[in-house]
């Protein structure tokens, strides 16, 4: 990245002329928080093949080290989501302390409700009462883990659904889901939240019990204010306007967080901001306009790095979110509002285009300099030897847990 302080000064002058408070923008960029997932550091991939990567994390302790390293490079990834039982340990307080010693914290706790054989016909929606009880007990277990690791988020995704018409009663399954979620809420630690994810399809192909944001929203309303919707950017039908979903849920106070990734077809789980960077910008623009209404939204990466170097893929994911946020912050929203009220369709649209097409790299360079982080984090990752060091120490490991959620 070949930018100088003079490049930043010129950009700051241009943004100031547009009415952008550059110092305020930098302040917000410095407090951005993108959570990385433990499963993204281990060997993982698609249902077809997992390609082992030299140095991929072997266990939760390796994952914490890698997450801390990514945070050192970018300064905006200070927490790590965990998946139980993949990241199960005997002493969760020690796990939280280990993360703290490495300069990060444990974020969302994710129960695993799709991996075991008994979940073939679903977990909390399974026709078997004993299987449903086992799934509920696991969610309660995760609620009990949360305060031990210092987490205030329970993140739920279910593979529950059916493949064939008549396979099970969809209305019965709906009621089973309601019952399980409402019961789980009783065990949430005080001040914590339950984030309910959804998926358009896969692995169930006739119907999915939580198939879209509306079904998750309905469940959240049943459960009360501690329950909110988790938007995965890959879990939608083609052409879905995710920015609209985000806007609606923000206005309802029910947007709990994101699983950030990119897709071209379905749940591709590619690096966020790659296939459709303008869509990511649109989403961030809605979040910026919501102001305080978005202050509690959790931003989490959820991707399947199968052919990509694990650390580079994770870092690029975080940096792409940083870029999208920076562009959303420099939109002339006052001017945009005037054009909207005047009915100037193309004038308003060009306000978005103007910000999106602005090269914000000098701004990000300056922010990183002021945060005492590498100006070009990806270059630093490739140059500093950490990846080579862990590859030599860890070698080619077996899978340390992976999901396509």
Image (cartoon, helix red, strand yellow):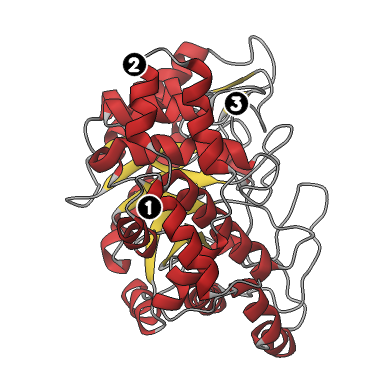
Q: Is residue 264 left or right of residue 192?
A: right
Callout 1: 10 Å neighbours few (<14), some, many (20+)? some
Q: Position of residue 330 (x, y in %)?
A: 42, 47
- Residue 122, compared with residue 343, is above or below; it is below
Camera-side residue of 25 and 102 = 25
Q: Does residue 385 show up?
A: yes
- The alpha-carbon separation of the residues under discs 2 and 1 comes to 24 Å
- Residue 373, compared with residue 353, is above or below; it is below
Q: Provide the residue designation for mark 1.
A: 16
Camera-side residue of 63 and 258 = 258
- The alpha-carbon separation of the residues under discs 3 and 1 comes to 43 Å
Q: Provide the residue designation for mark 3.
A: 200
- Residue 100, compared with residue 227, is above or below; it is below
Q: Is residue 320 left or right of residue 397?
A: left
Q: Does residue 364 show up?
A: no
Q: Position of residue 253 (x, y in %)?
A: 26, 31
* Residue pictured at 67% horizontal, 18% vertical: 206
Name which of mark 2 and mark 1 comes first in the sequence.
1
- The alpha-carbon separation of the residues under discs 3 and 2 comes to 35 Å
Q: Element at badge 2? A: helix
Front disc: 3 or 1: 1
Camera-side residue of 68 and 317 = 317
Q: Provide the residue designation for mark 2.
A: 341
Q: Element at badge 1? A: helix
Name which of mark 3 and mark 2 comes first in the sequence.
3
Query: Do the residues under discs 3 and 2 have CB atoms within 8 angstroms?
Result: no
Name which of mark 3 and mark 1 comes first in the sequence.
1
Q: Position of residue 151 (x, y in %)?
A: 31, 60
């Amino acid at each position: 990245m070949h930018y100088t302080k003079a490049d930043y000064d010129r950009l700051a002058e241009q943004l100031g002329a547009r009415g952008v408070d550059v110092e305020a923008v930098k302040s917000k960029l410095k407090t951005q928080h993108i959570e990385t997932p433990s499963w993204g550091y281990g060997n993982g991939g698609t249902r077809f093949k997992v390609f082992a990567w030299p140095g991929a994390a072997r266990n939760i302790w390796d994952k914490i080290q890698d997450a801390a390293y990514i945070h050192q490079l970018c300064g905006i990834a200070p927490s790590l989501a965990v998946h139980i039982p993949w990241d199960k340990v005997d002493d969760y307080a020690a796990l939280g302390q280990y993360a703290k010693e490495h300069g990060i914290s444990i974020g969302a706790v994710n129960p695993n409700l799709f991996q075991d054989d008994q979940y073939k016909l679903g977990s909390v929606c399974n026709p078997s009462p004993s299987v449903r009880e086992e799934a509920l007990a696991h969610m309660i277990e995760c609620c009990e883990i949360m305060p031990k690791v210092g987490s205030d988020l329970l993140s739920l995704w279910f593979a529950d659904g059916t493949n064939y018409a008549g396979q099970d009663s969809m209305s019965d399954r709906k009621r089973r889901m309601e019952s399980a979620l409402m019961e789980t809420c009783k065990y949430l630690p005080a001040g914590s939240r339950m984030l309910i994810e959804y998926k358009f399809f896969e692995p169930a192909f006739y119907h999915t019990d939580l198939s879209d944001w509306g079904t998750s929203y309905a469940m959240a309303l049943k459960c009360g204010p501690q329950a909110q919707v988790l938007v995965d950017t890959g879990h939608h039908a083609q052409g879905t306007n995710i920015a609209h979903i985000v806007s609606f849920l923000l206005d309802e106070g029910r947007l709990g967080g994101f699983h950030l990734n990119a897709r071209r077809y379905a749940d591709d789980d590619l690096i966020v901001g790659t296939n459709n960077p303008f869509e990511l910008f649109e989403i961030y623009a809605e979040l910026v306009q919501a102001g305080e209404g978005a202050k509690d939204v959790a931003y989490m990466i959820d991707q399947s790095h199968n052919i990509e170097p694990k650390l580079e893929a994770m870092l690029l994911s975080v940096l792409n979110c940083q870029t999208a946020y920076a562009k959303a912050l420099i939109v002339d929203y006052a001017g945009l509002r005037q054009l909207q009220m005047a009915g100037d369709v193309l004038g308003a649209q060009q306000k978005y285009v103007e910000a999106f097409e602005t090269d914000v790299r000098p701004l990000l360079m300056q922010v990183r300099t002021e945060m005492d982080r590498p100006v070009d984090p990806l270059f630093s990752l490739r140059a500093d030897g950490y990846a080579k060091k862990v590859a030599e120490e860890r070698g080619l490991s077996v899978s340390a847990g992976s999901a396509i959620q």
